[in-house]
């Protein structure tokens, strides 16, 4: 059942290595450029409990003897060194900000152990703000935080616990840690192995974190409540009331194909925010949409981040508060679309009936899968080449397949497709993975979305209902194409829980028909 821990590390080791090499390059390339610029200081800051955090400070040129500059604090991403943001920090300083970037505890030269955005990390953020207000010409009334990935999550958590933070830009972050790496009660194996491997190579995982990963990979169901509690403590979603009470202006940006923090978990969080807010989605995987900005190249995410702070920290009337707050970039057209809120993204829904009764055998990968972490979504981002499968050739012994009619006009899929079906299993546990494909005239399917679903404790032979949200997306299905829903039981992205010899039967009872509901933009 599932994949052993060792095999997962083998699967991800190439990705981990590539990420770290890229991360080091990202850090060092801007450092060479920025270190010659006046105003850059490398400092040690005492974090929570006195733990030393390695940091750098950039102040605006000519700031000596003056005060009142807005402050931006940038916690580093998972596994990246403290020079990660130097190029963007220099740009912000040139615009009149004091910028403090620090290496989060447990990584590189900072002290302590990796706490995964636990209470010490949140306390560290406040200590860095304290230090900046005491040691730079920063204005205590104009404090912002931003970061990519790990830095994004810490920034959101800090905004719940520190009322001084007035604006946040959380880029490729998480709102719900459990819904990110354990959605559908299914371990996102490659994502977790990447985090585990990168943390071990660049930092010092705490004993608690090592145990969390051990329990996660071993599929120890008795530890599931502990895992969920651990994740909820580290999820901004848990503290939504405090974030709203504190009132910081929150900008969220993510990639449609983010394999670490899938887009859905940001949506619920965004909808529950009551203060000034903005939600941006673009093609790409985890942090790939904003990564070019670390090299100083033109980058929409960082441009909007600057505009967000200019308005909410400096009071500039740049119009960002009057734009449609939900901004989506389609994977198919590359153009931006603005919406007043998330529910307006999908104006209508079209159901594809999943008729009849279909039985598949478990434990074999049918050939339909979500791709490879990072690689697949980057190919989609750059070349519009998502993972593909020949739908007619998928072996029906291991894959259930349903198709829509040919569409006479293009279908603009926007938002979250939802699967509703009835499953009868021969074993009490199991995993299924649903895929939505855009199928061309020759039967070649391009992946539109997917999501895993795991069940435990079901009575063999007794039907039960399954409701599954696929990962949100923006994708245009051309005229003359079909949509296909494919379900199988094995995907390299996820740990599966299918006992040997298991079979799954999908049915569509008259009183409760099965379907996939596809969200469509108004034509």
Image (spheres, rainbow, N blue to C red):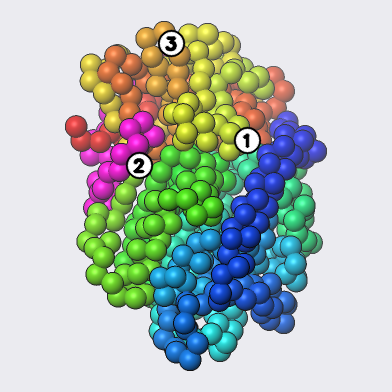
Crowd rating for badge 2 (residues with CA inside 10 Å; few <14, some 14–19, many 20+) = many
Question: Which residue corresponds to mark 3?
Answer: 443
Q: Which residue is at the front of the view, 488 or 79?
A: 79
Q: Quadrant of the N terminus?
A: top right
Where residue 86 appears, as percent x and y from the top left, is: 57, 63
Query: Could one spot residue 240 in this view of the protein?
Result: no
Q: Is residue 96 above or below residue 299?
A: below
Where residue 82 appears, as percent x and y from the top left, is: 65, 64
As measured in the structure, the alpha-carbon distance from the residue carrying label 3 to the one carrying label 1 is 26 Å
In the visual, does 375 lie left or right of 357? right
Q: Is residue 356 above or below residue 79?
A: above
Q: Which residues are magenta?
A: 330-356
Q: Which mark is residue 329?
A: 2
Where residue 259 appears, as percent x and y from the top left, is: 55, 41
As measured in the structure, the alpha-carbon distance from the residue carrying label 1 to the one carrying label 2 is 27 Å
- The first of marks 3 and 1 along the sequence is 3
Q: In the structure shown, which secondary structural element does the residue marked by tag 3 occupy?
A: loop
Q: Outermost residue toward the left?
A: 523
Q: Residue at x 28, y 26 (%)?
A: 411
Q: Which mark is residue 494?
A: 1
- Residues at badges 3 and 1 in contact (C-beta under 8 Å)? no
Query: Could one spot residue 296 in this view of the protein?
Result: yes
Q: Residue at x 68, y 41 (%)?
A: 18
Q: Residue at x 56, y 74 (%)?
A: 38
Q: Quadrant of the C terminus?
A: top left
Q: Is residue 17 above or below residue 523?
A: below
């Amino acid at each position: 059942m599932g994949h052993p821990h060792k095999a997962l590390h083998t699967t991800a080791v190439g990705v981990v290595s590539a990420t770290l090499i890229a991360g080091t390059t990202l850090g060092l390339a801007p450092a060479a450029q920025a270190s010659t610029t006046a105003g850059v200081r490398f400092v040690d800051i005492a974090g929570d409990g006195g733990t030393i955090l390695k940091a750098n400070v950039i102040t605006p040129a000519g700031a000596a003897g003056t005060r009142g500059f807005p402050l931006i604090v940038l916690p580093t991403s998972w596994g990246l060194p403290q020079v990660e943001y130097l190029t963007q920090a220099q740009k912000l300083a040139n615009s009149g900000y004091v910028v403090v970037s620090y290496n989060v505890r447990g990584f590189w030269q900072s002290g302590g152990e990796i706490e995964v955005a636990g209470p010490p990390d949140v306390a560290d953020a406040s200590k860095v703000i304290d230090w900046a207000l005491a040691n730079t010409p920063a204005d205590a009334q104009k404090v912002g935080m931003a970061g990519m990935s790990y830095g994004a999550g810490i920034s959101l958590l800090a905004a719940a616990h520190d009322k001084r933070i007035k604006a946040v830009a959380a880029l490729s972050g998480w709102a719900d840690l459990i819904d990110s790496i354990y959605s559908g009660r299914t371990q996102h194996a490659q994502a977790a192995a990447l985090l585990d491997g990168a943390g071990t190579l660049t930092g010092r995982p705490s004993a608690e974190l090592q145990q969390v990963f051990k329990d996660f990979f071993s599929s120890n169901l008795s530890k599931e409540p502990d895992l969920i509690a651990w994740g909820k403590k580290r999820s901004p979603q848990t503290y939504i009331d405090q974030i709203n009470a504190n009132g910081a202006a929150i900008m969220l940006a993510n990639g449609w194909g983010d394999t670490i923090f899938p887009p859905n978990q940001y949506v619920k969080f965004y909808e529950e925010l009551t203060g000034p807010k903005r939600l941006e989605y673009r093609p790409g995987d985890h942090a790939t949409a904003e990564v070019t900005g670390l090299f100083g190249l033109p980058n929409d995410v960082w441009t909007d981040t600057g505009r967000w702070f200019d308005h909410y920290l400096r009071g500039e009337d740049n119009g960002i508060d009057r734009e449609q707050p939900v901004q989506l970039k389609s994977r198919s057209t590359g153009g931006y679309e603005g919406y007043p809120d998330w529910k307006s993204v999908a104006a209508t829904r079209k159901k594809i009936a999943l008729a009849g009764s279909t039985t598949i055998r478990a434990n074999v990968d049918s050939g339909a899968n979500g791709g490879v972490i990072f690689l697949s979504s980057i190919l989609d981002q750059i070349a519009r080449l998502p993972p593909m499968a020949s739908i007619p050739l998928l072996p029906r012994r291991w894959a259930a397949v349903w198709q829509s009619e040919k569409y006479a006009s293009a279908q603009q899929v926007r938002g979250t497709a939802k699967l509703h079906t009835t499953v009868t299993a021969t074993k009490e546990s199991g995993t299924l993975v649903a895929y939505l494909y855009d199928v061309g005239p020759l039967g070649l399917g391009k992946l539109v979305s997917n999501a895993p679903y795991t069940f435990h404790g079901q009575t063999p032979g007794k039907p039960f209902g399954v409701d599954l949200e696929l990962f949100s997306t923006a994708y245009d299905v051309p005229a003359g194409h079909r949509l296909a829903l494919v379900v199988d039981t094995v995907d390299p992205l996820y740990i599966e829980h299918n006992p040997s010899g298991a079979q799954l039967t999908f049915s569509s009872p008259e009183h409760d028909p099965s379907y996939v509901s596809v969200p469509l933009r108004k034509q």
